[in-house]
């Protein structure tokens, strides 16, 4: 019996230590981003980026009411592209060169599901318990030659993906997830503060059909006024 109790206690302590380690990493990550209070104070975001693909520079703007709605706009060779998610529904405008008609159309349910995650701009680790997410520490690995903590995230809906936190800054350096049967990676780098909150200035998406896509952040506005009528279907 004593041996059984000792084994059980050792197992309990190991699990408890593991849980504390995960929470410590998450706490350091939240602090590195700017702190829980600052993050909670962000109600809207307006982000201007440029996308580099096949030698072209494509400007884009994302307007977001955190947790509620977002609208992304970009222009390719004079053709406007719009994607909007408002709650659990979405719509988009695709030019003919992308298989569309140039008129507003409903966004497919699977695409809406993928876009909804963007309504949470600071990621699955922030307030992860309240969101119903589970976090596992896989171990310490190298990402682009730097030490990083590999965390496995499982959402309350059962979606699983991997996040890597830089071991020095505790900021997200890489995200790996499976989308439509394909594994994609997003690398985050060159963080800079805006009103005390860190934003990655460079994001590289690897593994898509168009090869590597590089997004560069040009401007971030926090809590700028947003006219929510822009999320209604067909809004210009």
Image (tube, helix red, strand yellow):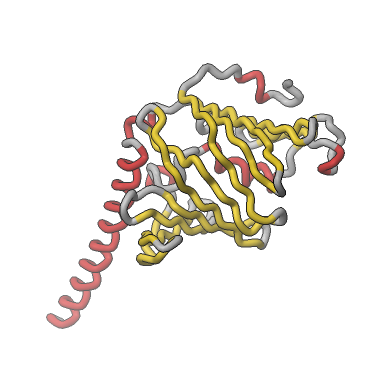
Q: Whole-percent x and y of residue 164?
A: 43, 57
In the rendered view of the protein, which quadrant contains the N terminus? bottom left
Horizontal relation, residue 223 to residue 87: left or right: left
- Which quadrant would residue 199 be assigned to in this image? top left
Q: Nearer the viewer, residue 115 or 53?
A: 53
- Which quadrant would residue 90 be assigned to in this image? top right
Q: Residue furthest left?
A: 2
- Which quadrant would residue 146 be assigned to in this image? bottom left
Q: Residue furthest front?
A: 55
Q: Nearer the viewer, residue 35 or 112?
A: 35
Q: Whole-percent x and y of residue 209?
A: 71, 56
Tell me what residue is drawn at x 50 percent, y 39 percent: 120
* Vertical comparison of 8 with 61: above or below: below
Q: Nearer the viewer, residue 146 or 38?
A: 146
* Vertical comparison of 216 with 212: above or below: above
* Vertical comparison of 146 with 223: above or below: below
Tell me what residue is drawn at x 58 percent, y 43 percent: 215
Tell me what residue is drawn at x 21 percent, y 67 percent: 13
Q: Whole-percent x and y of residue 18?
A: 28, 63
């Amino acid at each position: 019996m004593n041996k059984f109790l000792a084994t059980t206690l050792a197992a309990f302590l190991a699990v408890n230590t593991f849980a504390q380690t995960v929470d410590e990493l998450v706490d350091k990550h939240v602090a590195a981003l700017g702190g829980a209070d600052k993050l909670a104070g962000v109600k809207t975001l307006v982000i201007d980026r440029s996308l580099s693909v096949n030698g072209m520079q494509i400007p884009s703007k994302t307007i977001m009411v955190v947790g509620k709605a977002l609208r992304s706009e970009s222009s390719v060779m004079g053709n406007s592209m719009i994607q909007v998610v408002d709650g659990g529904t979405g719509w988009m405008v695709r030019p003919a060169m992308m298989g569309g008609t140039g008129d507003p159309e409903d966004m497919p349910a699977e695409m809406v599901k993928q876009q909804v995650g963007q309504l949470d701009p600071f990621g699955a680790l922030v307030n992860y318990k309240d969101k119903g997410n589970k976090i596992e520490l896989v171990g310490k690995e190298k990402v682009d030659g730097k030490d990083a903590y590999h965390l496995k995230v499982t959402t309350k809906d059962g979606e699983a993906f991997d996040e890597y936190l830089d071991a020095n800054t505790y900021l997200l350096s890489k995200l790996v997830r499976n989308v439509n049967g394909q594994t994609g990676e997003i690398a985050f780098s060159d963080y800079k503060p805006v009103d005390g909150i860190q934003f990655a200035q460079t994001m590289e998406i690897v593994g898509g059909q168009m090869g590597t896509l590089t997004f560069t952040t040009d401007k971030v506005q926090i809590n700028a006024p947003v006219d929510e009528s822009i999320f209604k279907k067909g809004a210009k």
